[in-house]
Image (cartoon, rainbow, N blue to C red):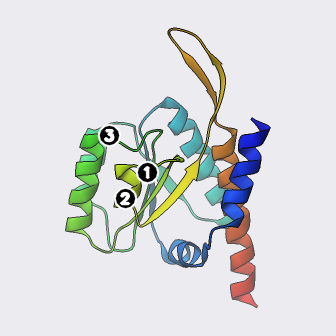
Amino acid sequence: MVKNLRLELSYFRALDFESFYSTLNQTENIYIYTTGWQQASIASYLSNQLLVNVGKPTVVMPSAISELKMSKNWLQDHDQLIVISFSGEDPDLCQLLDELHLLNEHLTITSLTTIKESRLASLSDYSLFFQPSLFHENISTKNWAFSPAYTMIDLLINGYCEWLRKEDE
């Protein structure tokens, strides 16, 4: 697990977040959609950090594709949709995101997925990656630690706070 945390820090340091932070700063409405229970926990943490540390309220949507389909009716220009997915390969989700981009070219889609190429990452304006650690595996289950995802969020929020301070100078 420590190795994956170090890799996450190295990965983060190698990225240029200027454009992402600028877009986030201009975003009025942030929606977070997840594809599962662990992803929902990560979304809740991200939502709390955005509100508490930078005053950006978010809406965490239920993990149901039918709920996301309804967003076609109310997503506005310059809204941001953050999608947290373990694999980034859900065909229904990817098709819907394609449709959302066609309906609103000013919608920003940010994905948070595991480190690998995925359809979701290719559809996103911004792609963030993390590598969970496998704690234990047996025939029927795999137990994962998602610490690197939380670390990515902490680094992202800290970086955004620093970016905001520089913008205010």
Which one is earlier in the sequence, the residue at label 2 or at label 1? Answer: 1
Residue 164, position in %: x, y?
Answer: 69, 78
Which one is earlier in the sequence, the residue at label 1 or at label 3? Answer: 3
- Which residue lies under the disc numbered 2? 122
Closer to us: 101 or 137: 137
Dot 3 falls on a residue whose secondary structure is loop
Q: Split into 4 quadrants, where in the image is the C terminus?
A: bottom right
Side of 100 where 3 appears, left or right: right
Gap in angstroms between the C-alphas marked 2 and 3: 13 Å
- Which residue lies under the disc numbered 1? 117
Q: Callout 2: few (<14), some (14-19), or many (20+) C-alpha neighbours within 10 Å?
A: few
Q: Is residue 73 visible?
A: no
Side of 74 where 135 appears, left or right: right
Q: Are marks 2 and 1 in contact (CB under 8 Å)?
A: yes
Amino acid found under the numbered disc labelled 1? Glu
- Which residue lies under the disc numbered 3? 90
Numbered mark located on residue 142 in the image: none
* Residue farthest to the top, as pictured: 139
Side of 105 where 151 appears, left or right: right
Amino acid found under the numbered disc labelled 2? Ser
Q: Residue at x 58, y 74 (%)?
A: 21
Which circle, 2 or 3, is nearer the viewer? 2
